Image (spheres, helix red, strand yellow):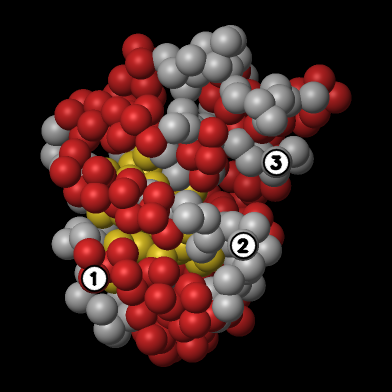
Amino acid sequence: MISGSIVALVTPMDESGAIDWVALERLLEFHMENGTHGIVVVGTSGESPTLPIEEHTEIIKRVVHCIAGQIPVIAGTGANSTAEALSLTEQANKAGADACLLVTPYYNKPTQEGLYQHFKLIADRVDIPQILYTVPGRTAVDLLPDTVDRLASHENIVGLKDATGDLDYGREVLGRCADRIAIYSGDDASAMQLIMMGAKGDISVTANVAPRLMAQMCAAALAGEMQAAAELNEQLSSLHRDLFLEANPIPVKWAVAELGLIKKGIRLPLTWLSEGYHEQVRDAMRQAGVIN
């Protein structure tokens, strides 16, 4: 089972928006050196909506090759088209990813039956571990506990990334489904609490900037070491908040560039972090001890 701090990796780009392959390898080395327990590549934090299928698949292949089995690689393969999500999941399986992460189809606003059929079709067709992903604040659709419960018995569905930030939702899906699938937080601000309730880890934006602290915090929470986890989480709390001053991944890419790991590249319609937020994000980085 994949557990711990799983970084929702940003996709490095140069100023023109082209993929920066050298920086991608540098990021992967950075995470392995700093104790990150798993990598989500080309998820929504990796700007998947602006990556064509060929580019998306090539990034997965390169990450799998570079990681070489040292930690799990989870490929983001969700889309608002079932056919596209199926194709991406098939390609990730061929590329050797350890699992796939599939966000609920955004904008379409499918019914719960539509969500069930969407995820079931992909799980039926592709024999790879699959993690469902609900983030209603970004997709305009929620994956209700009843639907998670229906899907949790499928042999290829192994997890749920809960980015609702709603601990009551998390408590319900844990109570109903934790004996069949792993529940992961997808909301850094409430991740510690959800792990203490029984989640297996955090698919984290903050881990892009403070991977060692996030790995330590998740490990402490998984071990039931509440005081240690709370102290580490307090050190990270400003990052949890300020990496969302503008739409993710705008602030986190700026912060990773401040660390000297990537260039100032992002794809439209996203733009570089507004100058008025720079010092606030720097202060959060200082609080976490990642810059002086």
Label 2 to label 3: alpha-carbon separation: 20 Å
Residue at the spot of label 1: 124
Q: For the residue labelled by badge 3, is the local secondary structure a helix, a strand or a loop?
A: loop
Residue 20 location (% of width, % of height): 42, 15
Label 1 neighbourhood size at 10 Å, few (<14), some (14-19), many (20+)? few
Q: Amino acid at mark 3?
A: Ala
Which residue appears at 35% of the width and 16% of the height? 21
Residue 39 location (% of width, % of height): 34, 42
Q: Which mark is residue 86?
A: none
Label 3 neighbourhood size at 10 Å, few (<14), some (14-19), many (20+)? some
Residue at the spot of label 3: 247
Residue 68 location (% of width, % of height): 14, 33
Quarter of the picture holding the C terminus: top right
Q: Tell which of 39 and 55 is nearer to you.
A: 55
**282 relative to 179 in the view: left or right:** right
Against 95, residue 65 (above or below) is above
Q: Amino acid at mark 2?
A: Asn
Q: For the residue labelled by badge 2, is the local secondary structure a helix, a strand or a loop?
A: loop
In the rendered image, the residue lying farthest to the front is 83
Which residue appears at 20% of the width and 48% of the height? 93
Q: Which mark is residue 108?
A: 2
